[in-house]
Image (cartoon, rainbow, N blue to C red):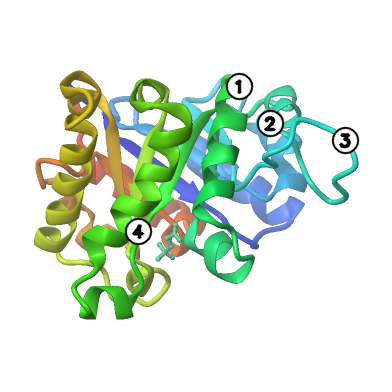
Amino acid sequence: MRRPIVAGNWKLHGSRAENGRLIEELTAQFPAKAVAACIVCPPFVYLQECARLLRGSSIELGAQDVCAEAQGAFTGEVSAAMLKDVGCEYVIVGHSERRLIYRESDQLVARKFAAAQSKSLVPILCVGEQLADREADRTEEVIARQLDAVLALSGVDAFANAVIAYEPVWAIGTGRNATPEQAQQVHAFIRARLGARSDKIAAETRILYGGSVKAGNAAELFAMPDVDGGLIGGASLKADEFLAILAAAGTQ
Ligand code: PGA
């Protein structure tokens, strides 16, 4: 049984005051019987304070990115050890905004994944195709390439302590989510690709869907057999909406 995860990616949003309000609302209304694990990923500068605000709650903390290097002359970067030090348990790697805007390669993303695991952070590895890839029927080729870079560097067993998020780029922030069937198809492909190397890892790895998940479409997406929760952008900034998505992942 894979415990679902609902993770909020706050991206470049928030302030100390806004984060404080959001966390207060989330923790005050947090359901006692949520089935899914719940994670929030604020910007780097707010992680330490968010860790303090979340203490004693059921909400876990993640970062949005990590440096592939452990330490040294890498101005502007934040290491896995630093994230762990301030209370993070998870870190997103390979988000499409990092891959596309900041030109992160599959190989760099694979190194970030390994760097996270070297400090016992759980990487949330994002994969996803662009609209042109889908239209050219290259979705599986792109996902395979992104996944294989990590498998080549870290091996399939590394996924025992990792989460995958399938996020079609054309669905991110567009209001146009993948249909449950489209998501399921790619999730099944990802699981089969892991399964070619290890049935056990394939059966146990959580694969989240991300891209315009809202309270109104979460339940039908999460109902698909290979969709184990969601990575939520815009809708994670509103407590009511985010908690409704969490509830869509099930209550005991
Ligand atoms: P969205 O973003 O929910 O705003 O589409 C998802 C993501 O980028 O993780």
SS label for mark 2 = helix
**Mark 4 lies on residue:** 167
As helix, strand or loop, the secondary structure at mark 4 comes to loop
Instruction: Indicate which disc, 1 or 4, sits on the residue closer to the N terminus.
Output: 1
Distance in Å between CA atoms under marks 2 and 1: 8 Å
Return the disc, 3 or 1, that comes first in the chain's sequence.
3
Are dots 2 and 1 in contact, CB under 8 Å?
A: yes
Rendered view: 54 above or below 176:
above
Q: Which residue is mark 1?
A: 118
Residue contact at pointers 4 and 2, CB within 8 angstroms? no
> Label 4 vs label 3: CA separation?
32 Å
Does mark 4's beta carbon lie closer than 8 Å to ligand 1?
A: yes
Image-quadrant location for residue 205: top left
Viewer-closest of 166 and 189 = 189
Measuring from the top left, give residue 56's x and y in whole percent.
57, 20
**Mark positioned earlier in the residue sequence (4 or 3):** 3
245 vs 137, left or right, is: right
- x and y percentages locating residue 129 in the rendered image: 33, 66
Q: Is disc 4 surrounded by few (<14), some (14 to 19) or many (20+) residues within 10 Å? A: many
